Image (tube, helix red, strand yellow):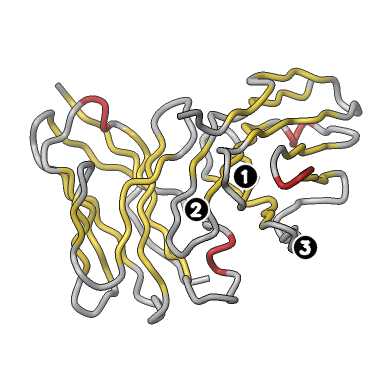
Amino acid sequence: DAKTTQPNSMESNEEEPVHLPCNHSTISGTDYIHWYRQLPSQGPEYVIHGLTSNVNNRMASLAIAEDRKSSTLILHRATLRDAAVYYCILRDETEGSGGYNKLIFGAGTRLAVHP
Amino acid sequence: GAGVSQSPSNKVTEKGKDVELRCDPISGHTALYWYRQSLGQGLEFLIYFQGNSAPDKSGLPSDRFSAERTGGSVSTLTIQRTQQEDSAVYLCASSLDRTNSPLHFGNGTRLTVT
């Protein structure tokens, strides 16, 4: 499986934007970039995913580098409830590859949000 | 709507005993996954079920671990002869069987082996 690299931790102040980076230099053409987050004492929850183009949804934006070797999850205005561990995961969506059978989680980035 | 439900939420057992953990996936979700998360660690994939296909058991750490999914719905993860290193949060997730379908996780079962 292609690997991702994320900083262990980041900090932000409330109501400021947060940019969470992820490096995936060995990404293949069929890998989608998925982001999940895990709030304290909860299971992970889906945030966003993309392939090549930047993506926006109600939770966040995903900016993908032109060469796809890195991406950035953007929280436009951090709130205290955004304090969580954020996971960047590559998922091979080729039918029959078995890739979308499972997500392989790394250590993620622990985001602290200060009032 | 109802999310993924796991029971029990907490389980304390003595070393050497068998335990069963239950997962009720979201209705209509054909894919079901088990992960475990040790204290302060990331998620470790255990097993994956998809419809009537043979499960992907590649993540099971030993033959003491097994899982079933009956009728394509409820799943049970069984750990035999529990060891202290089995202590962790066991998470279940389900998804539709479609490209990029997100996983929906339950809140897990916290297993403590004494």
Q: How many marks?
A: 3
Q: The residue tagged with tag 3: helix, strand or loop?
A: loop
Q: The residue tagged with tag 1: helix, strand or loop?
A: strand
Marks 1 and 3, the one that precedes in the sequence:
1
Q: What's the residue at 16%, 36% (across, down)? A: A12
Classify residue B23 as left or right of residue B42: right
For the residues labelled 1 and 2, say whether their Cβ atoms are less than 8 Å apart.
yes
Q: CA distance from mark 1 to mark 3?
A: 18 Å
* Same chain check for tags 1 and 3: yes
Q: Amino acid at mark 3?
A: Ala
Residue identified by numbered label 1: B35
What percent of the width, then of the height, locates residue B108?
59, 30
Residue nearest the viewer, comparing B52 with B47: B52
Q: What's the residue at 25%, 57% (across, down)? A: A21
What percent of the width, then of the height, locates residue A53?
20, 70
Q: CA distance from mark 1 to mark 2?
A: 10 Å
Q: What's the residue at 23%, 51% (across, down)? A: A20
Residue identified by numbered label 2: A105
Protein chain holding label 3: B
Classify residue A40 as left or right of residue A59: right
Dot 1 crowding, Cα within 10 Å, few <14, some 14–19, many 20+: many
Q: CA distance from mark 3 to mark 2?
A: 23 Å
Residue identified by numbered label 3: B54
What percent of the width, then of the height, locates residue A25?
34, 75
